[in-house]
């Protein structure tokens, strides 16, 4: 598996020697993604300029049994793009063309290095936009969105990346090129498009992505509401959904997250308030007006202490700037932090936040909370000081929070992925047979195990587990299905 001279030469031929980074300083720039607590310097970095060069690089890796990790903008928050020490990083940052925008069929075809926001910019002249909007949408790329099945603030109404990708051209781990999906999200046969979406770079590399575009809504109404407690804000979220209203977005921030965001961007949030909600409705004007009045009444009923309604596009942008700045802004109030990503049922938001506060207090660490309240997708930020020796304690707390979400009927991840960070927690959510099935699917795509190894599934190397003997599924024993 080591990267020898023959493998280096093959990779240089594949992408061009001028597109190879092998000096120590250059390689260190790729040592981690947005989860900076985990760092590994790769043996080599290649920057192909087109899809053909990506396929050639993967073929070279397959021929020489060299592990490789695809990397987009590096904004991921689960260690999904963490390099392998004796492997290659294949950076897709130069594949950044918008290949086609079709306003009639409402589709766009883009390369994986195109940023999320650039898709909307390319479609804007036609009155169209791309709905998924992660907080990092100005810099995160569509290839990474596909890998992690990213969502964003508006996923409550519009869904995740998987709801908006129709087809992909994919380089498989042996270097062959296939198309997954088609002209619509529903295709005959196994849903390989669905298998690939959210596979965190473990099944291959997407080199072209066809996304669906939506019409820009007729009306958008946005408010920012303060509450005397997190529980009151959580009750508002439940009551809005119970009233049959499906907002485009419902976001919650607590005291620490608001403090950090205000210090960074001065968006007009109330510093010191226990909780704030951002609620946005969109759609036909008359429907928005009626539902907006209902939302305001629900906020008042739960003791809203301040209600700010965006009166212009600039004010709406300011509200969202505060919300989307929260992750990065936390660096202003803590030298280090882990970003967690778990999901709980909406009805258990208040309970889980109280449990997280207790866990943070017991660990002697602060936890800031900013999350997609509408669908129960939490993003607790565990604040710590590495220089003071708090890293291990913070890592344990972060992992315990993710596992708490599973305990309360939720999931380990809503959109950031499992990556390196939560691979060892997977048995908390899935049984042995489930994990074995996932491993067999992965092996069907990548029998040599060279495509983003060490991610998602727990391994003895990562988790100190003892590998168990494979146990066949009852349907396999009965002859109804075959083992891949």
Image (cartoon, rainbow, N blue to C red):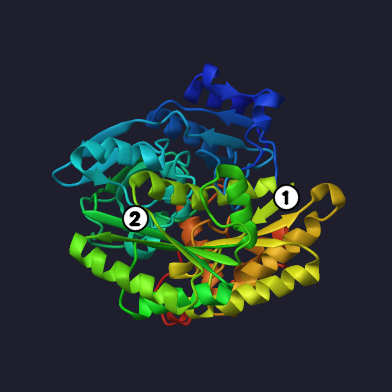
7, 199: nearer the viewer: 199
Residue 62 on image: x %, y %: 52, 39
Identify the image quadrant of residue 367.
Answer: bottom right
Provide the secondary structure element on which disc 1 rests. loop
- Position of residue 466 in the picture relative to residue 168 (left or right): right
Find residue 293 and name its label.
none
Residue 335 on image: x %, y %: 74, 46
Find residue 334 and name its label.
1
Residue 135 on image: x %, y %: 48, 49
Q: Is residue 163 above or below residue 305?
A: above
Question: Residue, x 79% and y 51% (percent of image)?
Answer: 385
Q: Quadrant of the N terminus?
A: top right
151, 476: nearer the viewer: 151
Compute the Cα span from label 2 to label 1: 40 Å
Identify the image quadrant of residue 418.
Answer: bottom right
Q: Is residue 322 above or below residue 89?
A: below
Provide the secondary structure element on which disc 2 rests. helix
Question: Residue, x 20% and y 43% (percent of image)?
Answer: 127
**Outermost residue, top direction?**
18
Q: Residues within 10 Å of mark 1 (few under 14, many from 20)?
A: some
Give the residue at mark 2.
193
């Amino acid at each position: 598996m080591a990267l020898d001279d023959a493998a280096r030469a093959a990779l240089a031929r594949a992408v061009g020697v001028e597109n190879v980074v092998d000096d120590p300083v250059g390689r260190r720039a790729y040592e981690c993604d947005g989860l900076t607590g985990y760092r590994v310097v790769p043996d080599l970095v290649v920057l192909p300029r087109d899809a053909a060069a990506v396929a050639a690089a993967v073929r070279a890796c397959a021929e020489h049994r060299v592990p490789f990790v695809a990397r987009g903008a590096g904004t991921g928050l689960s260690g999904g793009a963490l390099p392998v020490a004796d492997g290659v990083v294949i950076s897709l940052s130069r594949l950044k063309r918008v290949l086609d925008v079709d306003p009639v069929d409402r589709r766009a075809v883009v390369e994986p290095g195109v940023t999320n926001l650039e898709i909307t910019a390319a479609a804007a002249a036609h009155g169209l936009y791309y709905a998924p909007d992660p907080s990092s949408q100005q810099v995160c790329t569509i290839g990474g969105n596909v890998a992690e099945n990213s969502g964003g603030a508006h996923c409550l109404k519009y869904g995740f990346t998987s709801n908006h990708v129709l087809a992909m051209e994919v380089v498989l781990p042996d270097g062959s090129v296939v198309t997954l999906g088609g002209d619509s999200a529903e295709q005959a046969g196994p849903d390989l498009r669905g298998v690939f979406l959210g596979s965190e770079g473990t099944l291959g590399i997407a080199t072209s992505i066809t996304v669906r575009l939506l019409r820009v809504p007729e009306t958008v109404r946005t408010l920012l509401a303060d509450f005397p407690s997190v529980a009151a804000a959580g009750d508002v979220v439940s009551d809005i959904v119970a009233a049959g209203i499906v907002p485009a977005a419902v976001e919650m921030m607590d005291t620490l997250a608001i403090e950090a965001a205000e210090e960074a961007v001065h968006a007009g949030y109330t510093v010191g308030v226990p909780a704030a909600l951002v609620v946005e409705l969109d759609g036909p004007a008359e429907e928005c007006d009626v539902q907006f009045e209902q939302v305001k009444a629900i906020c008042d009923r739960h003791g809203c202490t301040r209600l700010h309604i965006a009166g212009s596009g600039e004010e709406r942008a300011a509200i969202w700037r505060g919300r989307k700045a929260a992750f990065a802004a936390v660096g202003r109030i803590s030298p280090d932090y882990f970003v967690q990503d778990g999901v709980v049922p909406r009805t258990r938001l208040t309970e889980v936040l109280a449990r997280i506060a207790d866990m943070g207090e017991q660990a002697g660490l602060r936890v800031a909370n900013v999350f997609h309240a509408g669908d129960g997708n939490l993003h607790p930020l565990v604040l710590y000081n590495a220089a003071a020796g708090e890293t291990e304690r913070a890592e344990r707390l972060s992992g315990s929070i993710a596992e708490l979400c599973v305990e309360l009927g939720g999931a380990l991840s809503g959109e950031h992925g499992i990556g390196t960070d939560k691979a060892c927690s997977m048995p908390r959510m899935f049984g042995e047979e489930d994990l074995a099935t996932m491993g067999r699917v992965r092996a069907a795509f990548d029998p040599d195990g060279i495509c983003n190894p060490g991610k998602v599934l727990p391994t003895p190397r990562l988790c100190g587990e003892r590998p168990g003997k494979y146990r066949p599924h009852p349907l396999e024993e009965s002859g109804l299905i075959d083992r891949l």
